């Protein structure tokens, strides 16, 4: 979201989600699907994201932007005296979740066509990372395909050059590279942007770019991508291991996304493809050379992953004369997406359950422009040997600024 007016800017976004999943939540539901076909449904209530924006305009082209995000209401821990164990003091994790600084950058603007940012940045690769706030998609949760295979929200430390001239906007970033030891079967390179340490390992750099075109009224067309070497970007630096010195784990991601926002009709879509070289060897190294206590992923990574999706929503309230001039809207929407987080190399085993189709239909009611109440039915379609995964969700989300 752009800064809007004043020297101090305060804003944010957040979402609440309530879901009933009509399929098993057993961890073996894919390895032994027949055993869990008749399992009961299960419910999940969550606050996926709650974000606070703080920005400041120092003047003379210098600005600051920060974003603090609480995922799943943050983390919790407690210390208690355990009377059943001789009165020992114990520290326990009370709940899961994350608190992250997703943006912290200082920018110098020389002209609309040329701006420089340095700090912790959002990496705008893919449609979701470019527009991840909850009023920028119709579903209760973030679009599943890109959210599964790409870091989201992808944020990393580095330098960004960006600008806009006429109908074109560009951005080029140099950031810390991804870590191939964090790649895995269920999420491809998603976790590679994270770090279990107090710092981000940057033995290797990553390079990202995005270009947007606005030539057609109400339509944005965008291309984005990333390139980096994933191997030897872990701690401690393993370049001493000459056996695997030539294994690079070149990671390439390409994405196309678009958004059409008309008066009554909104349509958005994306197509993403990622490729990792030496995937088979990386999977072997992860399995055999990392200790059980190491903070790395043990499951294999495929040589590729893909995601594609499209959603459309139509404001049906404008059809009724008595509410036509009011600011509230009611979108009837549908979404379809396909994704596969694990496309194996020829010498890798296949795991067909990662190949998924998903459809969702529902409503988004905007009583005011900054708030949406969402409801949807979704159905995840897997290969025939597995059980499909339907669910019903409702949610409420907001996005806006508290200062102007």
Image (cartoon, rainbow, N blue to C red):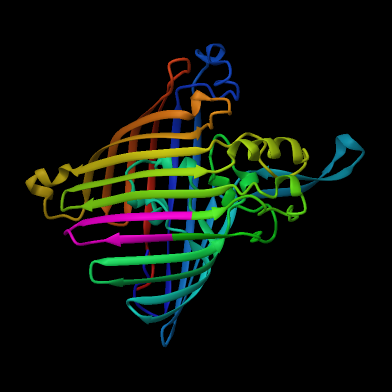
Question: Which residue appears farthest toward the bottom when viewing the image?
Answer: 60
Residue for point 64% across, 61% down: 202
Residue 315 or residue 259, whichever sits in front: 259
Locate residue 291: give its quadrant: top right
Give the tally of numbered discs.
0
Question: Which quarter of the figure is the N terminus placed in?
Answer: bottom left
Question: Which residue appears farthest toward the left when viewing the image?
Answer: 321
Asked if 337 appears above or below 190 in the picture, the reply is above
- Taking the image as shown, residue 269 lies to the left or right of residue 391, namely left
Residue 373 or residue 347, whichever sits in front: 347
- Taking the image as shown, residue 153 lies to the left or right of residue 86, namely left
Question: Which residue appears farthest toward the right when viewing the image?
Answer: 86
For residue 376, say whether it is visible: yes
Does the magenta segment cover residue 307?
A: no
Residue for point 52% across, 21% down: 24
Segment colored magenta: 209-226
Residue 156's spot in the image, x, y percent? 55, 60
Residue 25's spot in the image, x, y percent? 55, 25
Question: Which quarter of the figure is the C terminus placed in?
Answer: bottom left
Q: Main secondary structure of the magenta part?
A: strand
Residue 384's spot in the image, x, y percent? 43, 16
Locate residue 383: give its quadrant: top left
Residue for point 35% across, 41% down: 139
For residue 144, say whether it is visible: no
């Amino acid at each position: 979201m752009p800064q809007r007016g004043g020297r101090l800017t305060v804003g944010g976004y957040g979402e609440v989600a309530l879901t009933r999943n009509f399929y098993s939540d057993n961890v073996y539901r894919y390895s032994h699907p027949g055993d869990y076909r008749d399992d009961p449904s299960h419910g999940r209530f969550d606050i996926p994201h709650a974000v606070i924006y703080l920005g400041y305009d120092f003047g003379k082209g210098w600005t600051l932007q920060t974003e603090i995000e609480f995922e799943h209401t943050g983390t919790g821990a407690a210390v208690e005296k355990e009377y059943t164990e001789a009165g020992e003091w114990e520290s326990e994790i009370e709940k899961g979740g994350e608190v992250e600084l997703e943006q912290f950058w200082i920018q110098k603007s020389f002209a609309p066509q040329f701006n420089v940012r340095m700090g912790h940045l959002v990496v705008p690769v893919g449609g979701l990372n470019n527009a991840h706030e909850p009023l920028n998609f119709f579903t209760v949760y973030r679009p599943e395909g890109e959210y599964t295979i790409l870091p989201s929200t992808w944020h990393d430390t580095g330098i960004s050059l960006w600008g806009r001239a006429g109908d074109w906007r560009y951005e080029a970033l140099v950031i810390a590279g991804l870590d191939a030891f964090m790649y895995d079967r269920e999420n491809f390179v998603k976790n590679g942007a994270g770090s279990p340490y107090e710092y981000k390992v940057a033995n290797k750099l990553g390079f990202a770019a995005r270009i947007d075109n606005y030539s057609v009224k109400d339509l944005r067309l965008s291309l984005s991508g990333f390139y980096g070497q994933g191997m030897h970007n872990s701690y401690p630096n393993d370049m001493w291991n000459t056996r695997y010195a030539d294994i690079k784990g070149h990671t390439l991601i390409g994405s196309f996304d678009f958004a059409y926002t008309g008066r009554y009709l909104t349509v958005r879509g994306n197509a993403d493809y990622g490729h990792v070289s030496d995937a088979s060897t990386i999977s072997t190294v992860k399995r055999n050379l990392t200790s059980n206590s190491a903070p790395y992923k043990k499951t294999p990574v495929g040589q590729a992953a893909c995601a594609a999706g499209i959603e459309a929503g139509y404001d049906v309230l404008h059809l009724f004369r008595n509410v036509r001039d009011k600011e509230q809207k009611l979108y009837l929407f549908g979404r379809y997406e396909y994704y596969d987080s694990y496309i194996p190399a020829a010498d890798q085993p296949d795991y067909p359950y990662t190949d998924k189709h998903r459809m969702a239909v529902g409503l988004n009611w905007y009583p005011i422009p900054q708030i949406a109440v969402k409801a949807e039915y979704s159905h995840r379609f897997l290969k025939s040997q597995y059980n499909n995964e339907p669910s019903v969700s409702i949610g409420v989300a907001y996005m806006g600024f508290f200062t102007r």
